[in-house]
């Protein structure tokens, strides 16, 4: 809900928010998540990854992206 939206605004949009989903790379997503992990927020990084993964899946389904780059991020 609002909490994840606020986290996306704080931790994702400043780093990759301007990048079109069609050109987003796994490295860009990983760099964004590492910034959160560097603050010691590993659980939050996992929740953010889940949200970005949902956004990517939706983007693929709706034809905005060819593939879900987050599928490469395991563990």
Image: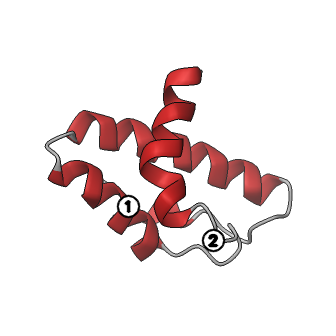
Please provide percent x and percent y for residue 72.
Answer: 43, 66
Q: Which residue is mark 1?
A: 32
Above or below, 74 relative to 6: below
Decide if residue 54 is on the left or right side of residue 49: right
Please provide percent x and percent y for residue 14.
Answer: 49, 59
Q: Which residue is mark 2?
A: 19
| Element assignment for label 1 | helix
Q: State which tag comes first along the sequence, 1 or 2.
A: 2
Q: Residue at x 44, y 64 (%)?
A: 29
Above or below, 48 relative to 5: below
3D distance between C-alphas at marks 1 and 2: 12 Å
Q: Residue at x 64, y 55 (%)?
A: 56
Decide if residue 39 is on the left or right side of residue 31: left
Hey, which residue is sitting farthest right in the picture? 62
Q: Which is more toward the observer, 64 or 73?
A: 64
Please provide percent x and percent y for residue 52.
Answer: 54, 49
| Element assignment for label 2 | loop
On-image quarter of the N terminus: top right
Q: Is residue 46 visible?
A: yes
Q: Residues within 10 Å of mark 1 (few under 14, many from 20)?
A: many
């Amino acid at each position: 809900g609002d909490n994840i939206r606020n986290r996306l605004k704080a931790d994702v949009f400043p780093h990759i928010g301007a990048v079109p989903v069609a050109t987003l790379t796994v490295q860009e997503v990983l760099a964004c998540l590492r910034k959160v992990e560097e603050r010691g927020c590993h659980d939050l990084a996992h929740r953010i990854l889940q949200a970005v993964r949902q956004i990517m899946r939706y983007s693929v389904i709706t034809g905005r992206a060819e593939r879900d780059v987050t599928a490469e991020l395991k563990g």
